Image (spheres, rainbow, N blue to C red):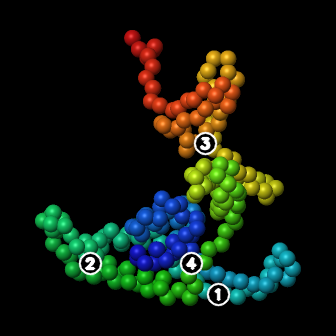
Amino acid sequence: MEALTYDRAQAYAKEIPPEEMATWQPDKVMKVLLEIEPTADRSYTLRIGEEPYPGGIPTKMHTVGTDTVFSLVELRKHYHAVGSVLHTPTMQQMERAKPLDAAKLRMRLEAITQSLTKSLESPIRNFTFGNFARLPCKRCGESIRKRLPTGQHPVEAKCFSCGAPYQVSLLNDGTVWWEPLTREAKCPTENCSGEFVLWLDEVKIGTHWSCSGCKKPYRIEFGISPDTGAE
């Protein structure tokens, strides 16, 4: 189960956030993939055909094969249920362990084996298709590549280099609009008309900057103010 899920994750390797690369439990890995592509755990049949002209519908389709994917439902059903026999239990777990029902365990392992065999015997594996949008990050300049799942717009994107967040929308004319997720504020210095923009990931304690108008430095900190509404 782990090997199949990790193998599938390789097809999405360039889209997995760096902080998720350390995820190892297969059900959690599959959840990450489903955030990228909602159909990542579904089985599918691949058919190809020659277009009679660019954009035309092929008159004949050739079936390449079916990829039977070990789904999130199956992972949730089986993976943790057999954890006690896959991993050596701690002393505390051994003391609290219930008697092993060998017949029940055998039935579960046989069911897992059948599902794994179907997946392993698939003539095709881990094909991914999608519409992608690209943009040089407006904060660091590195290239951002984001999958646009069908029917799910807008979607959030993040630069893997600097973490800058965006909202990506597919417009009616087919163009893609990248909206930097920022917050604007006016300088609190008296008589200063300066304004500053912070990215959403910068709106946190410790962020500091200098006003472009009065040049006065500011930083975000915890604050306490009088509760004028209290009796």
Residue type indicated by callout 4: Asn
Number of residues whose C-alpha sits closer than 10 Å to that of mark 2, classed few (under 14), some (14–19) or many (20 or more):
some
Q: 4 or 159: which is nearer to us?
A: 159
The residue under label 2 is 105
Measure the C-alpha gap from mark 1 to mark 3: 46 Å
- Front of the two marks 4 and 3: 3
Residue type indicated by callout 3: Trp
The residue under label 3 is 199
Question: In terms of sequence position, does the residue under pointer 4 or pointer 1 come before the other?
Answer: 1
The residue under label 1 is 64
The residue under label 4 is 126
Q: Residue at x 49, y 88 (%)?
A: 121
Q: Position of residue 188 (x, y in %)?
A: 61, 22
- Front of the two marks 2 and 4: 4
Number of residues whose C-alpha sits closer than 10 Å to that of mark 3, classed few (under 14), some (14–19) or many (20 or more):
some
Q: Residue furthest right?
A: 53
Q: Residue at x 58, y 52 (%)?
A: 162
Q: Secondary structure at mark 4?
A: loop
